[in-house]
Amino acid sequence: MKLLVAEDEPKTGIYLQQGLREAGFTVDRVVTGTDAIDQALNEAYDLLILDVMMPGLDGWEVIRRLRAAGQAVPVLFLTARDGVDDRVKGLELGADDYLVKPFAFSELLARVRTLLRRGNSSLPVQTTLQIGDLQVDLLKRRASRGGQRIDLTAKEFALLELLMRRHGEVLSKSLIASQVWDMNFDSDTNVIEVAIRRLRAKIDDEFEVKLLHTCRGMGYRLEAQDEE
Amino acid sequence: MKPGSLTLRLSLLFVVAVAAVLMIVGIAFNELSRHHFRALDAQALEEKLAAITQIATESGANPDLLRTRWHTLLGAHPDLSAVLLQADGRTFFAEPPQAAAPGLEQATQRDGVWEWENEAGMFRALKSAVPLPDSPPLTAWLVLDVTTHMHFFTMLQRWFWSVLVASTVLSAALGWLVAKNGLLPVARVAQTAASMSAGSLKERIPLGPVPDELRELITAFNSMLGRLDDSFMRLSNFSADIAHELRTPISNLRTHTEVILAKKRAPEVYEENLTSNLEELNRLSSIIDGMLFLARSDNGLVVPEPVELDLRAVIGKLFGYYEFLAEDKGVPLRVSGNASVLADSVMIDRVVSNLLSNALRYTPAGAAIDVGIHDYGGRVELRVENPGPEIAPEHLERIFDRFYRADPARREGTGNTGLGLAIARSLMEAHGGNISCTSTGGRTAFILTFIRTPTLQG
């Protein structure tokens, strides 16, 4: 997967490039809108990450020219301004997603993965998910680990399903709150911590190999082998 | 009339009032005089007629004597003429001799008195039968020349108009003086107000030497100054608070980083410290998000997208969210009542979530949080009530202020940014509703009030 990051703030751009590379993507970086257009027209990218406020050509102008040139690559906007008008303008111009600074890198990574998945949705519909010896039957709403049945409440199951579907990714608390409980705002409670602790007690506590990992300050990740 | 100058306005009103009063007095005087003259004339005519009749009764048998006595009676009155006609229409007596019976083409009759006007002047007349002892009664016409009265009225009118014009001019001048003088206290108040600045918001306009009518205005002005002062204070406190709220985490970050970089360490130590820094940065980030949200809200940029919301369902969803946490703390969540309102779904989730998270923070284990929904028709109340430490009255008013914490010790930890209640209030205000708090008898309740307006319901 090849990404292009256009960001005029050099520090931000370098960190984004490094973070995305370490997440397994090939990442090119430019610092002006003009360069972004040149690069995007000459190379095949899977996703563009554009800063809205760039000197010269801003992100909106870049996407306008790219779309005019028939380039349909998905675009994720980064902006320091959070106005509804800005958001609407960006989406009207054909942006695929919109992220307001300051954002958590894990959040950006999750959005990038979602946008890239959208491109190849030809994956077969899965009815069972498996990570290590943890198995989830999405139709029967049942979970088991090592053949041992695990009783989960509806919300615990929804939480596990989300973590399983996006295994390997760090999921932030606000993403989990939004996906599992439909709470679409940041709240300063420790509801998610408690929910994770409960889930962990059921799927991990009695087993040698731990699957559910806490990434302090970032979120939670479900993974068979801890890379560390 | 343009509302430019109050003095001009008052003077003009004064002029109009004086002119109107003078007009009424003039017209009334005119009418009364006319009435009085008419009565006098009628009386004079009736007295003469009575004398004529008296003489006719006494000397009727002797026509010559009769005429002589009538002549004596009437000859001394140049403005009075009399004609007495026989039944066949011939003149029996006339004084002055050339007088004839009046033609009555333009005459009007009022209370038995005839009245007419022609080029010779104005006349009033009485017509009556005068009985004679031996012959048929005579018809008597008694005519009074009242032209002099008319002259009087013409003069009266001329005087009246002159006086009216003069008084109007005079009253305009007087009115201007009176208004100018009467408005002096206003000018003095304006002077005081003009000398106020942001630095002197604590000053008030003194009520002492001010007339009663201005008291209300000044009281209102003073209370406006009070509110301004309050907002100004809050704004300054807010800036100071921002500095403090941001300074603490930034200073922590700096110290941490400097200490860690001071010598070589094991990778785990770097990792631990970076993680700790990340947590601090997340806190900073959420403070900035909250402050930006409040700033947008203050500028009217937070616009709800109202939909029909079933509050019971909203509470159900939020209880689902807080279920694990509440179970963990051993605090049952209870709801009663139901109502639906037009409101923005995400915003109301956020408001109620803030209240529930707040309540969970302070409710002791074993005690329950009660949510009550009350539909009062025109308004809907949602109460989130919990037992727990009471909030002192002096804190109640300020609890919705940004960064205001009743207990300064609660500043750190729990991830609380101190903006939750301020955001809840701004969201409720964006909905045209409000939020309030009571804390008595060991129970604290937050009350959301939604106002139902006909347009919103439509």
Image (spheres, coloured by chain):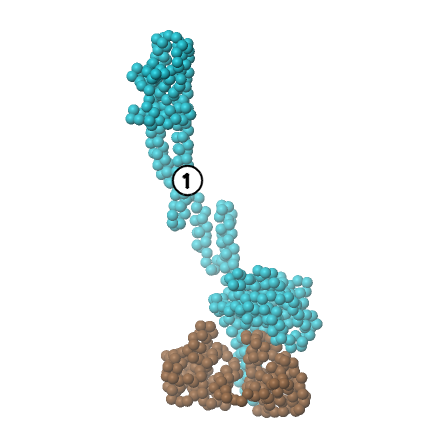
Instruction: Name which quarter of the figure residue B90 lies in.
Output: top left
Where in the figure is residue B411, as x and y percent of width and height? Answer: 59, 72
Question: Observer-nearest residue: B396 or A167?
Answer: A167
At a point 41% along the width and 33% down the height, the residue shown is B25
Q: Is residue B432 above or below residue A200?
A: above
Where in the figure is residue A86, as x and y percent of width and height? Answer: 44, 74
Can residue A5 be spotted in the picture? no
Chain for mark 1? B
Relative placement, left or right, of B389 versus A48 is right
The amino acid marked with disc number 1 is: Ala
Which tint was used for chain A? brown
The residue under label 1 is B17
Q: Is residue A150 above or below residue B137?
A: below
At a point 47% along the width and 78% down the height, the residue shown is A98
At a point 57% along the width and 75% down the height, the residue shown is A183
At a point 55% along the width and 71% down the height, the residue shown is B345
Relative placement, left or right, of B195 versus A176 is left
State the SS at label 1: helix
Can residue A150 be spotted in the picture? yes
